[in-house]
Image (tube, grey):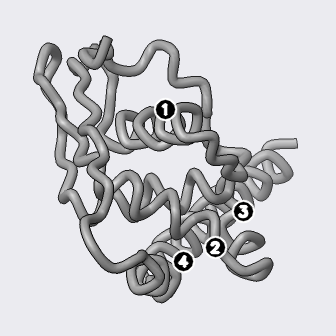
């Protein structure tokens, strides 16, 4: 039994390492063409301004969770329907572009509304294969952001 348990634990660790490597590979190698195409497709003239999303970090909050909440709020406010894979894509790219670091409890976190819009728009234009690639991470994400950040936009 010990040998079986040891093999199972080893298999679990190998699977976790493979999943982590896949996540890093996907995050680094997903083309950002969709976002660039989205920007190029905007009408000439003044782009509409998008408000920033400001939150106060709570214990355990990460920038990625705050970005997820901003993406979801943007979707609700602007009637933009994103898949869960699209949300993961948008929050990952938003976090990377914003260089989101560690948060301190009580820290005010302003998420640039233009970046939220950019990545939400790009997420809405993912191909089926890109959706499928990002869908791998969906089971590991808690999309309930009710307890993330105290919203300062109200």
Residue 48, percent across and down? 32, 55
Q: Earlier in the sequence, mark 1 or mark 2?
A: 1
In the rendered structure, find residue 136 and report the number of the disc placed on it: 3
For the residues bearing labels 3 and 4, Cβ distance under 8 angstroms: yes
Q: Earlier in the sequence, mark 4 or mark 2?
A: 4
Identify the residue at image location x=44%, y=52%.
91
Badge 3 local density, few (<14 within 10 Å), some, or many (20+)? some
Task: Report helix, strand or loop for mark 2.
Answer: loop
Q: Residue furthest front?
A: 45
Q: Earlier in the sequence, mark 2 or mark 3?
A: 2
Residue at mark 4: 26
Badge 1 local density, few (<14 within 10 Å), some, or many (20+)? some
Residue 33, percent across and down? 47, 88
For the residues bearing labels 4 and 1, Cβ distance under 8 angstroms: no
Residue 86's quadrant in the figure? bottom right
Task: Report helix, strand or loop for mark 4.
Answer: helix
In the rendered structure, find residue 73 and report the number of the disc placed on it: 1
Left or right, 106 with respect to 28, comes to left
Residue at mark 2: 125
């Amino acid at each position: 039994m010990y040998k079986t348990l040891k093999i199972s634990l080893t298999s679990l660790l190998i699977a976790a390492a493979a999943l982590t490597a896949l996540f890093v590979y996907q995050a680094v190698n997903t083309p950002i063409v969709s976002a660039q195409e989205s920007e190029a497709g905007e009408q000439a003239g003044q782009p509409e301004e998008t408000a920033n999303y400001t939150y106060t970090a709570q214990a355990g909050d990460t920038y990625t969770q705050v970005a997820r909440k901003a993406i979801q709020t943007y979707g609700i406010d602007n009637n933009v329907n994103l898949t869960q894979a699209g949300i993961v894509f948008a929050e990952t790219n938003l976090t990377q572009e914003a260089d989101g670091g560690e948060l301190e409890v009580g820290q005010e976190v302003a998420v640039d509304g233009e970046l939220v819009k950019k990545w939400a728009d790009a997420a809405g234009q993912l191909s089926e294969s890109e959706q499928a690639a990002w869908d791998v991470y969906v089971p590991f994400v808690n999309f309930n952001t009710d307890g993330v950040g105290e919203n300062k936009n109200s």
